[in-house]
Image (spheres, rainbow, N blue to C red):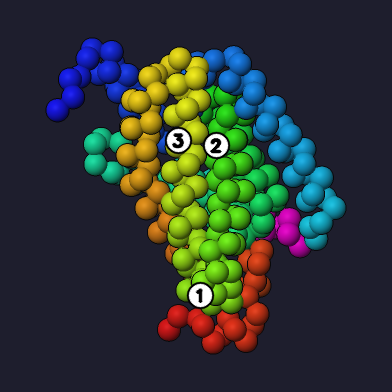
């Protein structure tokens, strides 16, 4: 068994309350925060331009409904062993319903509201939270979901289910690793401690993310498959729909 030093124990207790990826103020250094802000602002600017030029007006109500659902779902925490809890992030869900550009804007709005009204994540590190859960969660989740769905069966429920479950879990895990690296680069916590803690717990939290996302998209698939950003062909959708 490895020897636990006082520093390691202190680092573990420091990290424990903040395993949900919403980084608080004061936990990132100025250079790391600024780099994340530059990436986040560029992402928002490009997303706004793409949404204005490519999306139809009928997508706006769906963006509002999606934002409200993800915001409400993130308020519900599910307990996991070890005294912490997890909640839906929603990046893959937003990407599958709205596409990566509109989905990233929805996630950004959710994070801004959470940080300003509920102090869930800091304002100075909002850029990092947008990068971790918006950029990685929405873009990474969407393109992985689309690739797996295309490989397994784009117009089958099986393909959608496999793609969204794997992508949702992966997006949470990769976002946790990115968060751990940011904390370590900022000198807040040792990299081995942050990586091991974040990777272990978010392996479990990612399972909850995958289940919730799959349930939500399965309902849309059965009732209104046309609402998906990449809808199945109607004939194929009826043929492969789960009984």
Say if mark 3 contacts mark 2, CB within 8 Å.
no
Q: Secondary structure at mark 1?
A: helix
Residue 26 screen position, x and y as percent: 50, 16
Q: Is residue 221 visible?
A: no
Q: Is residue 230 visible?
A: yes
Residues 115 and 157: in front is 157
**Residue at 46% across / 49% down in the picture?**
170
Vertical order, 129 against 226 (above or below): above
Q: Label 1: which residue?
A: 157
- First in residue order: circle 3 vs circle 2: 2
Residue 48 screen position, x and y as percent: 78, 44
Q: Secondary structure at mark 3?
A: helix
Residue 177 circle label: 3
80 sits left or right of 27 in the view: left
| Disc number lying in front (1 or 3) | 3
Residue 41 screen position, x and y as percent: 72, 32
**Residue at 45% across / 58% down in the picture?**
166
C-alpha distance separating marks 3 and 2: 9 Å
- First in residue order: circle 2 vs circle 1: 2
- First in residue order: circle 1 vs circle 3: 1
Residue 112 screen position, x and y as percent: 61, 34
Residue segment shown in magenta: 58-64
- Image quadrant in which the C terminus is located: bottom left
Residue 62 sits inside the magenta stretch: yes
Q: Label 2: which residue?
A: 132
């Amino acid at each position: 068994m490895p020897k636990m030093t006082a520093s390691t124990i202190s680092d573990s207790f420091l990290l424990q309350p903040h395993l949900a990826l919403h980084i608080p103020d004061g936990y990132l250094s100025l250079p790391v925060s600024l780099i994340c802000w530059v990436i986040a602002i560029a992402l928002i600017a490009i997303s706004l331009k793409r949404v204005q030029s490519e999306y139809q007006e009928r997508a706006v109500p769906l963006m509002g409904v999606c934002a409200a659902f993800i915001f409400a779902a993130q308020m519900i925490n599910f307990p996991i062993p070890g005294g912490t809890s997890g909640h839906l992030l929603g990046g893959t869900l937003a990407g599958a319903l709205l596409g990566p550009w509109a989905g990233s804007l929805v996630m950004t709005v959710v994070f801004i509201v959470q940080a300003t009204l509920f102090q869930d994540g800091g304002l100075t590190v909002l850029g990092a939270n947008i990068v971790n859960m918006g950029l990685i969660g929405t873009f990474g989740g969407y393109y992985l979901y689309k690739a797996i769905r295309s490989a397994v069966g784009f117009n089958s429920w099986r393909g959608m289910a496999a793609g969204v479950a794997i992508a949702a879990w992966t997006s949470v895990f990769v976002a946790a690793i990115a968060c751990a690296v940011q904390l370590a680069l900022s000198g807040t916590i040792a990299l081995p401690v942050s990586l091991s803690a974040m990777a272990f717990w978010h392996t479990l939290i990612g399972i909850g993310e995958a289940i919730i996302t799959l349930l939500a998209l399965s309902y849309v698939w059965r009732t209104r498959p046309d609402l998906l950003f990449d809808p199945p062909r109607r004939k194929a959708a009826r043929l492969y729909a789960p009984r």
